[in-house]
Image (cartoon, grey):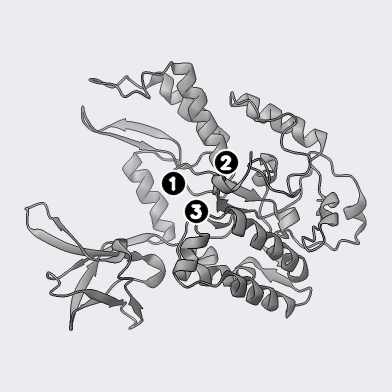
């Protein structure tokens, strides 16, 4: 049986319920060593990663915890306590905190309403999609694919792809809103350059005007510019089950593996479908047999080969902090990874159960979902 501790952030004395054991730390050290990485501290991770005040080394849990199967339900009363921790961490470390406030977002009201919704459910077991319904509301205001629970698909956590649509003609005035085929209308933020129509040229050199929206709002049918509605033609957007096969077709691989392919003497294609340890090892192996590029080499390629491999492995290990469900095709990013065993993102076993009072073996990490928040390191002491 998996152990699941309960951490009540409203009473920090309960933080003693969660400790990283010496066995956990030893296993983590061995895993990092296999990647050629030296831990930033010894022992590592910290025995109590949730102790206040937070530092840049806080909130890091053993990577073995991420390699588990994610639970599909959360107990409402336990998750309610975890939202208090999430509120505190995001206020300190979330890079988009002030940006959301400038958009008119009220963080205190957001977390207060989330807490009230959970309180109304008592100790019910909630599906992941229900538990994170308020988070999806925030994603509608400020889409951030780098943040959120490390479980469920895009629809569950409110993430979305960018979606380009070409306008039938040049806009004659400022574009203020767009509609999808179902008639739903969405405003265009005049203060956000990314939402405004842009001009480029097609293959024949003719001017093309396009707009970029998100897949969460559906395909764009028309855009209102000035007093006119201009028809739009969205680019092909594959369904989720179509996306991966098409990416593999472009990569010319049968499986989701790292690949490097020369397209021309000056252009190459490279794909990193994930940053798991096996993928990183495949990347290092491929680097040893890939023909060296011709012509001028960048400063990064002029580094000693061993140094390059170690830097790449370290980047892969950092990305692993997003968990086994981390999506590929994404840039490296530093995240604060929050354990579900202390964030309440656990199956919701009762605290009074016998298992909660028994020591946990290193081979039986607590089941959890995890939550990623891009670090704002300037706000965290070393």
Left or right: where 200 falls relative to 283: left
Q: Secondary structure at mark 1?
A: loop
Q: Quadrant of the C terminus?
A: top right
Residue found at x 61% / y 71%: 108
The answer to which of 99 and 137 lies nearer the viewer is 99
Where residue 160 appears, as percent x and y from the top left, is 43, 62
Q: Which residue is mark 1?
A: 330
The answer to whether mark 3 and mark 1 are in CB contact below 8 A is no
**Mark closer to the chain start, 3 or 2:** 3
Residue found at x 70% / y 40%: 62
Q: For the residues carrying marks 3 and 2, which lies nearer the camera in this image? A: 3
Left or right: where 86 falls relative to 155: right
Q: Real-space Cα distance between discs 3 and 1? A: 9 Å
**Mark closer to the chain start, 3 or 1:** 3
Is residue 318 visible to us here? yes
Q: Which residue is mark 3?
A: 146
**Mark closer to the chain start, 2 or 1:** 2
The answer to whether mark 2 and mark 1 are in CB contact below 8 A is no
Q: Real-space Cα distance between discs 2 and 1? A: 12 Å
The answer to whether mark 3 and mark 2 are in CB contact below 8 A is no
Q: Quadrant of residue 195?
A: bottom left
Q: Quadrant of residue 20?
A: top right
The answer to which of 276 and 137 lies nearer the viewer is 137
Q: Residues within 10 Å of mark 3 (few under 14, many from 20)?
A: some
Left or right: where 183 falls relative to 59: left
Q: Residues within 10 Å of mark 1 (few under 14, many from 20)?
A: some
Left or right: where 54 falls relative to 91: right
Q: Is residue 196 above or below residue 301?
A: below
Q: Which residue is mark 2?
A: 320
Q: Real-space Cα distance between discs 3 and 2? A: 13 Å
Q: Secondary structure at mark 3?
A: loop
Where residue 273 appears, as percent x and y from the top left, is 45, 42
């Amino acid at each position: 049986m998996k152990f699941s501790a309960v951490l009540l952030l409203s009473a920090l004395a309960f933080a003693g319920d969660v400790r990283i054991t010496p066995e956990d730390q030893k296993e983590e050290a061995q895993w990092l060593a296999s990647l050629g990485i030296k831990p930033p501290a010894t022992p590592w991770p910290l025995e109590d990663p949730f102790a206040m005040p937070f530092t840049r080394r806080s909130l890091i849990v053993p990577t073995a915890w991420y390699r588990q199967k994610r639970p599909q339900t959360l107990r409402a009363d336990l998750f309610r306590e975890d939202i208090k921790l999430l509120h505190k961490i995001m206020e300190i470390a979330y890079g988009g905190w002030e940006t959301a406030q400038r958009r008119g977002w009220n963080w205190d009201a957001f977390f207060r309403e989330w807490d009230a919704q959970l309180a109304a459910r008592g100790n019910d077991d909630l599906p992941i999609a229900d538990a994170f319904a308020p988070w999806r509301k925030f994603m509608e205001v400020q889409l951030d694919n780098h943040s959120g629970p490390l479980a469920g698909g895009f629809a569950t956590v409110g993430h979305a792809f960018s979606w380009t649509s070409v306008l039938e003609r040049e806009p004659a005035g400022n574009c203020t809103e767009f509609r999808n085929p179902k008639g739903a209308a969405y405003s265009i933020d005049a203060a956000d350059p990314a939402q405004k129509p842009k001009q480029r040229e097609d293959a024949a050199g003719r001017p093309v005007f396009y707009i970029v929206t998100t897949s969460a709002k559906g395909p764009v049918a028309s855009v209102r510019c000035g007093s006119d509605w201009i028809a739009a033609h969205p680019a092909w957007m594959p369904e989720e089950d179509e996306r991966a096969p098409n990416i593999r077709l472009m990569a010319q691989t049968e499986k989701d593996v790292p690949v490097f392919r020369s397209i021309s003497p000056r252009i190459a294609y490279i794909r990193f479908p994930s940053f798991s340890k096996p993928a990183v090892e495949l990347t290092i192996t491929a680097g040893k047999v890939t023909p060296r590029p011709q012509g001028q080499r960048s400063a990064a390629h002029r580094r000693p080969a061993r140094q390059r491999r170690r830097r790449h492995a370290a980047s892969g290990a950092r990305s692993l902090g997003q968990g086994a469900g981390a999506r590929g095709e994404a840039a490296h990013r530093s995240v604060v990874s929050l354990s579900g065993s202390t964030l309440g993102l656990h199956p919701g076993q009762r605290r009074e159960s016998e298992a909660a009072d028994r020591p946990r073996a290193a081979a039986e990490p607590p089941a959890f979902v995890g939550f990623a928040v891009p670090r704002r390191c300037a706000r965290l002491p070393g």
